[in-house]
């Protein structure tokens, strides 16, 4: 049985530092520039009936820095009441410049909300937690 020494192991890429995390209806990346526009930022949704699918679409915008190398970026939407995962997404990014800020967007075209409550949008890089944003889903008055 071969034992691999720590000297021969691939170095783990640095853990990202969060600069921003926001939920919005749309992320627009301007072609030819590095400008990002977030449309319809939100922290609360209301519905007159449950369950309902939010079909307008939500997007989660994350900006990280102090990153270099390959990252498997994962997002999970968790209903906090019972810790149930209701949606998830994943992307792989290769980042060259550790000093630069890097934008990551996750599109959620439809999310099934079975009941009112708080929903946590959690982001991970290489299976390590980075940050989360909470969305409050309420019954309309």
Image (cartoon, grey):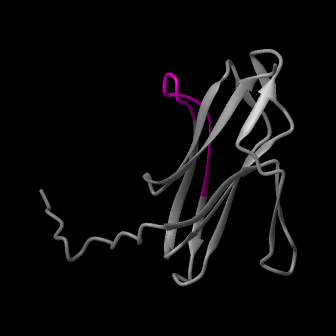
* Figure check: 48 above or below 88: above
Measured from the top left, where is residue 50 in percent x and y? 76, 15
- Prevailing secondary structure of the magenta residues: strand
Give the mark count: 0
Q: Residue furthest front?
A: 141
Quadrant the N terminus occupies: bottom left
Measured from the top left, where is residue 57 in percent x and y? 82, 41
What residue is shown at x 41% (from left), y 71% (from top)? 13
Q: Quadrant of residue 117?
A: top right
- Left/right placement of residue 109 relative to residue 103 reads right
- Left/right placement of residue 24 relative to residue 22 reads right
* Figure check: 20 above or below 95: above
- Left/right placement of residue 27 relative to residue 105 reads right
What residue is shown at x 68% (from left), y 54% (from top)? 22
- Left/right placement of residue 140 relative to residue 123 reads right
What residue is shown at x 82% (from left), y 48% (from top)? 25
What residue is shown at x 48% (from left), y 67% (from top)? 16
Q: Toward the viewer: 67 or 26?
A: 26
* Figure check: 100 above or below 57: below
Measured from the top left, where is residue 59 in percent x and y? 74, 49
Measured from the top left, where is residue 123 in percent x and y? 54, 51
Is 82 magenta? The answer is yes
| Residue range (magenta) | 78-91
Is 20 magenta? The answer is no
* Figure check: 28 above or below 32: above
């Amino acid at each position: 049985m071969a034992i691999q020494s720590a000297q021969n192991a691939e170095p783990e890429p640095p853990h990202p530092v969060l600069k921003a995390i926001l939920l919005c209806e749309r992320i627009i990346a301007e072609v030819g520039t590095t400008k990002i526009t977030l449309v319809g930022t939100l922290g609360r949704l209301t519905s007159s009936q449950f369950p309902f699918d939010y079909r307008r679409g939500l997007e989660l915008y994350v900006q990280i820095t102090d990153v270099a190398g390959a990252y498997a970026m994962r997002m999970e939407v968790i209903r906090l009441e019972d810790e149930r995962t209701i949606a998830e997404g994943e992307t792989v990014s290769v980042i060259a410049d550790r000093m630069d800020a890097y934008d990551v967007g996750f599109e959620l075209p439809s999310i099934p909300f079975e009941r009112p409550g708080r929903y946590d949008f959690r982001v991970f890089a290489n299976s390590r937690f980075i940050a989360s944003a909470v969305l409050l889903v309420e019954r309309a008055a």
